[in-house]
Amino acid sequence: MRILLLKAALLVCLLTAVTASAAQSETLRVTVGDNTVTVTGITPGESVIIFCVTRETHDYVPLVRRYQAVVADTERAGTVTFQPQDRIAPESIIAAVELNSGRMAIGSRGNFVPRQLADDGRGVGRGITGELTRLQKRGQFFQLLVVRPGVGAWNLITGDGGPSDHDHASDRAVTIDVDQLVAVEGASAPVPKQFRPGDVVIGVETHEFAYFVAGVRP
């Protein structure tokens, strides 16, 4: 009897492992409606941060909005849905990141195709202490998201020459220190002192309305 119970327990563990492995091999997909963002292909039971930046013009003035939320797959269905408080503009860039694994996907609404910023040779770099404490990128205005898998998520709104731009100079580039990041509600953790390999760094340049994903090298 004990042997049968042991075999049954091992079978359950094996099936669970196979299911989790299959889920992790599935690609994340972001589907956007008028006022919903649905992410499929996530690991069952995972929590996902949905980071949505939109732009639309009112009376010739571009209006940028950001919506974000941490949504848990409480049903273990491999899918989550987020409903922002407003209609999602057609011009949108939406990132979805699993908080534990760091798996991510970029999506948009309708026929709009998000453009990726050209690689300018900049990104996560070393500060005056020699540690990986800075993020540099050519551009004017950025909405930033940093996710450290298994730890937390942070973001920042920054602009060229603004208070959070390290050199405070209008030089069409932004440099920020990692300790300026702000914890995301629902994924809060102490602000990191440096970037680490494995961190997911996403930015949307809202003037050109294009995005980047930066890797962190040792």
Image (cartoon, grey):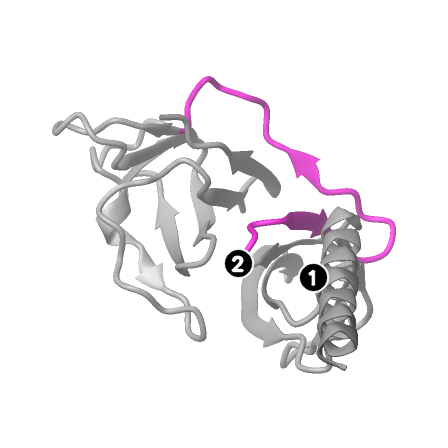
Specify few, some or many for label 1: CA neighbours under 10 Å numbering under 14, 14-19, or 20 or more.
Answer: many
Residue 34 percent across, percent down from the top left: 80, 72
What amino acid is at disc 2? Asn
What amino acid is at disc 1? Thr
Residue 212 percent across, percent down from the top left: 56, 36
Judge whether residue 108 can be spotted in this image: no
Magenta range is: 100-123
Residue 136 percent across, percent down from the top left: 36, 31
Q: CA distance from mark 2 to mark 1?
A: 10 Å
Q: Residue at left 65%, top 72%?
A: 45
Farthest residue toward the top?
121
Q: 16 left or right of 120?
A: right
Instruction: Locate the C terminus by quadrant.
Output: top left
Image quarter of residue 159: top left
Question: Label 2's element?
Answer: loop
Residue 9 percent across, percent down from the top left: 72, 73
Q: Residue at left 35%, top 39%?
A: 196
Specify few, some or many for label 2: CA neighbours under 10 Å numbering under 14, 14-19, or 20 or more.
Answer: some
- Residue nearest the viewer, comparing 133 with 36: 133
Farthest residue toward the left?
129
Question: Label 1's element?
Answer: loop
**Residue 43 circle label:** 1
- Residue nearest the viewer, comparing 152 with 63: 152
Instruction: Say whether disc 2 or disc 1 marks the residue closer to the N-terminus.
Output: 1
- Residue nearest the viewer, comparing 214 with 115: 214
- Residue nearest the viewer, comparing 139 with 43: 43
Q: Residue at left 72%, top 52%?
A: 24
| Residues at discs 2 and 1 in contact (Cβ within 8 Å) | yes
Q: Residue at left 55%, top 72%?
A: 69
* Secondary structure character of the magenta stretch overall: loop
Q: Which residue is mark 2?
A: 100
